[in-house]
Amino acid sequence: MNRFKLSLIILIFSLAALSGCGSSALDDYNDVSFNLVDQNGQDVTFPDDFKGQPLVLGFVYTNCPDICSFITANLYKTWVELEEPDDIHFVIATFDPERDTPEVLKNYAEAFNMDRPPFRFLTGPEDEIEAFMQRTGVRSQVSYTREIENGDDLYFLSHTDKILLIDQNSRLIMDYGGSMTPTHIITEDLQKL
């Protein structure tokens, strides 16, 4: 292959790679609307109520014995690393609405010193949460169940470990491993928005 053809091939591949750079969104949530409720019982519409500011969104359930507390702590740590901004939304949504009522989420938020702006903890009707989780790519399933003394079932969930970075225009920019991504990576990505 002569030098001209090789240069032409390199140029074509470079242009193809650059053309993808302008389209960095992984998803666009402008075509959906989910009616949820926060830890204070206030109605929340996703994504409409978060437009105009970046959003860091984590997914947990409050009965989680392990990684959910790390996901929650990573949202808090990211906020601290950014010097406690008030122009970024920090939101945690549960995929266990049956147990994670607004009151339960409020207690959970208080335990992490996050029951205050800019933090919000979201739940909602089971069908709405299911549709929300499906759209955001969060999967969960019962992994362990046993009956406890009062006759209720105790269960734990296997689930996706995820934090999303959504820009001010409701576009998904990054999808992180929620419990394991170093928070400085999330803060650096936020500073680029």
Image (tube, rainbow, N blue to C red):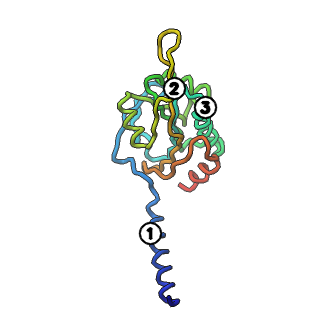
Label 2 vs 3, first from the N-terminus: 3
Label 1 vs 3, first from the N-terminus: 1
Secondary element under disc 3, as helix, strand or loop, is: loop
**Classed neighbour count for the residue bearing mark 3: other residues with Cα under 10 Å, few (<14), some (14–19), many (≥20):** few
Residue 120 drawn at (x, y percent)? 51, 33
Q: Amino acid at mark 1?
A: Ser
Residue 93 drawn at (x, y percent)? 48, 34
Q: Which residue is mark 2?
A: 144
Tell us which disc is closer to us: 1 or 3: 3
Residue at horizontal 53 percent and vertical 42 percent from the top: 162
Q: Quadrant of residue 108?
A: top right
Q: Which residue is mark 1?
A: 19
Q: Does residue 48 appear in this view?
A: no
Q: Amino acid at mark 3?
A: Asp
Against 70, residue 98 (above or below) is above
Cα gap from disc 2 to disc 3, whole angstroms: 14 Å
**Dots 2 and 3: beta carbons under 8 Å?**
no
Against 165, residue 3 (above or below) is below
Q: Amino acid at mark 2?
A: Tyr
**Classed neighbour count for the residue bearing mark 1: other residues with Cα under 10 Å, few (<14), some (14–19), many (≥20):** few
Label 1 vs 2, first from the N-terminus: 1
Residue at horizontal 54 percent and vertical 37 percent from the top: 118
Q: Is residue 31 left or right of residue 90?
A: left
Secondary element under disc 2, as helix, strand or loop, is: strand
**Dots 1 and 2: beta carbons under 8 Å?**
no
Residue at horizontal 47 percent and vertical 81 percent from the top: 9
Tell us which disc is closer to us: 1 or 2: 2
Residue 183 drawn at (x, y percent)? 63, 46
What's the mark number on residue 107?
A: none
Q: Which residue is mark 3?
A: 66
Secondary element under disc 1, as helix, strand or loop, is: helix
